[in-house]
Image: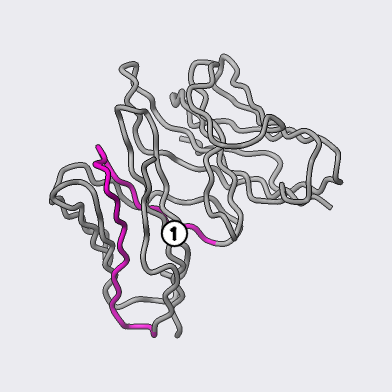
Amino acid sequence: KAGVTQTPRYLIKTRGQQVTLSCSPISGHRSVSWYQQTPGQGLQFLFEYFSETQRNKGNFPGRFSGRQFSNSRSEMNVSTLELGDSALYLCASSIRRDSGEKAEAFFGQGTRLTVV
Amino acid sequence: TQLLEQSPQFLSIQEGENLTVYCNSSSVFSSLQWYRQEPGEGPVLLVTVVTGGEVKKLKRLTFQFGDARKDSSLHITAAQPGDTGLYLCAGENSSASKIIFGSGTRLSIRP
């Protein structure tokens, strides 16, 4: 069974540009969550998608957005990049039972974004 | 706001020593996970504990969930350099459909 796949692994962008990151969850997993990880702030929750709908959202500005497709694959977009957006962006997939309960999260290897 | 506090934040010990990492909260969780993350990689799930008082063993690692399901500990016996990494605990609040991550414990094992 394939794990969570994130692409690209590494990315360098300049300030003001926008970027799109992709995440393919484990087959059968319908919930996808995105996290930003920096040395100073640790793992910060961005948002969660389930059934193509955003279900939970963290405290990030509107420049950070996402979406989920019918096959559960998800994309995350950051517009007008700032230097402080440099981080490891992690995607996690989990089984989300229809009752709303969520099981443990399995992470991808992450996308290392550097903004220069 | 639910918070998970991990301690210590940093730990550097000699190979062969034992250590314990703690994960504490004032909130009750329906389950709690422990992850280990190496630099540049995503966190890898080590274990999930669900029942209050539950103890799980994974080779030299022993995980315990507090009786009240508010805290957890990870004990490593005879630490090896391969145990080096960032250890994260994560609590699941099933009613809110949220997973809360602790700030992590960075462990370094000196050969």
Outermost residue to the front: B1
Counting the numbered discs, the total is: 1
How packed mark 1 is, by other alpha carbons closer than 10 Å (few <14, some 14-19, many 20 or more), is many
Q: Which residue is found at the position 48% from the left and 27% from the top?
A: A56
Q: Is residue B13 magenta?
A: no
Provide residue B109's location: percent of width, then percent of height.
43, 78
Q: Is residue B23 magenta?
A: yes
* Subunit ID for the residue under disc 1: B
Q: Is residue B56 left or right of residue B38?
A: left
In depth, the one of A83 and B41 nearer the eye is: A83
Provide residue B41's location: percent of width, then percent of height.
57, 54
Q: Which residue is mark 1?
A: B104
In the depicted structure, whether residue A8 falls above or below residue A77 = below
What amino acid is labelled 1 in the image? Answer: Gly
Magenta part of the protein: which range? B14-38
Q: Which residue is found at the position 42% from the left and 39% from the top?
A: A105
